[in-house]
Image: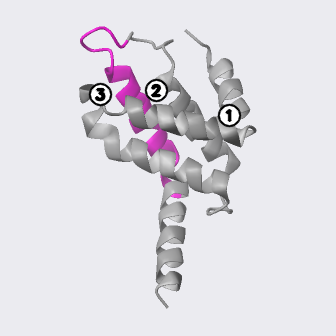
C-alpha cells in the first residue's frame, strides 16, 4: 500500500503531466463502471470533468490543493494498491469512501467550478 506522501507525489506527477491526466481520466471512466461504485459514479464523473476542464484551460481559477487531492483520489481508484483489494466482495468500499471523503474536502472548490460552468453556458447562449 502506498503511504500518504506517495499518493500526493503520484498526484503531483499527473498534475504536472497533462497528457498523463487524459490517460488517467480514461482509466477512471472505465473503472467507474464497476457495480460497487454505482452510488458514487456521478461524483467520480464530476471529478474527472473538473480535472479535464483544468487541463484544457476551460477552468482557470482552480485551487491547486483541491486539484492535487482530486487527482490523488482518481489515481487511488485505478491503482491496484488499495487498502481493501478490489477482488474481495467488499473491495470497492474503500474506493467509494475515498471519493466521498474527497468530495467533502473539496466541496467549496466544486461549487465554484459548477458556478463557472453555469456562467459559461449562460454567456454562450447570448
Q: Residue 23: which quarter of the image?
A: top right
Question: In this picture, which residue range is highlighted in magenta?
Answer: 86-108
Q: Residue at x 62, y 38 (%)?
A: 21
Q: Look at the image and say whether residue 89 sits in the magenta stretch.
A: yes
Q: Residue furthest bottom?
A: 126
Q: Give how far across and how far down residue 113 sits, in percent.
A: 53, 62
- Residue receiving disc 1: 14
Above/below status of 67 relative to 99: below
Is residue 79 shown in magenta? Answer: no
Q: Position of residue 38 (x, y in %)?
A: 26, 36
Q: Is residue 107 left or right of residue 21?
A: left
Of callouts 2 and 3, the N-terminal one:
3
Residues under numbered marks 2 and 3 in contact, where contact means CB atoms less than 8 Å apart: no
Task: Give the distance between the C-alpha atoms of the residues marked 1 and 3, in whole angstroms.
Answer: 23 Å
Report, in whole angstroms, how far the alpha carbon at label 2 lies from the one at label 1.
Answer: 14 Å
Residue 77: numbered disc: 2
- Secondary structure predominantly adopted by residues drawn in magenta: helix
Residue 68, compared with residue 8, is above or below; it is below
Looking at the image, tell me whether mark 2 or mark 1 is earlier in sequence order.
Answer: 1
Q: Is residue 31 above or below residue 103?
A: above
Residue 34's mark?
3
The answer for how far apart the CA atoms under marks 2 and 3 are is 11 Å
**Mark 2: few/some/many CA within 10 Å (<14, 14-19, 20+):** many
Q: Image quadrant for the N terminus? A: top right
Q: Characterize the local packing of mark 1: few (<14), some (14-19) or many (20 or more) Cα atoms within 10 angstroms.
A: many
Contact? badges 2 and 1 (CB < 8 Å): no
Amino acid at each position: 500500500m502506498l503511504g500518504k506522501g506517495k499518493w500526493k507525489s503520484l498526484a503531483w506527477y499527473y498534475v504536472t503531466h497533462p497528457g498523463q491526466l487524459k490517460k488517467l481520466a480514461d482509466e477512471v471512466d472505465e473503472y467507474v463502471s464497476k457495480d460497487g461504485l454505482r452510488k458514487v459514479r456521478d461524483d467520480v464523473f464530476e471529478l474527472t470533468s473538473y480535472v479535464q476542464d483544468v487541463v484544457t484551460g476551460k477552468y482557470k481559477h482552480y485551487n491547486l490543493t483541491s486539484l492535487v487531492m482530486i487527482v490523488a483520489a482518481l489515481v487511488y481508484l485505478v491503482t491496484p494498491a488499495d487498502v481493501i483489494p478490489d477482488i474481495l466482495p467488499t473491495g470497492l468500499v474503500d474506493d467509494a469512501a475515498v471519493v466521498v471523503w474527497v468530495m467533502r474536502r473539496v466541496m467549496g472548490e466544486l461549487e465554484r467550478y459548477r458556478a463557472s460552468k453555469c456562467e459559461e453556458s449562460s454567456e454562450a447562449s447570448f
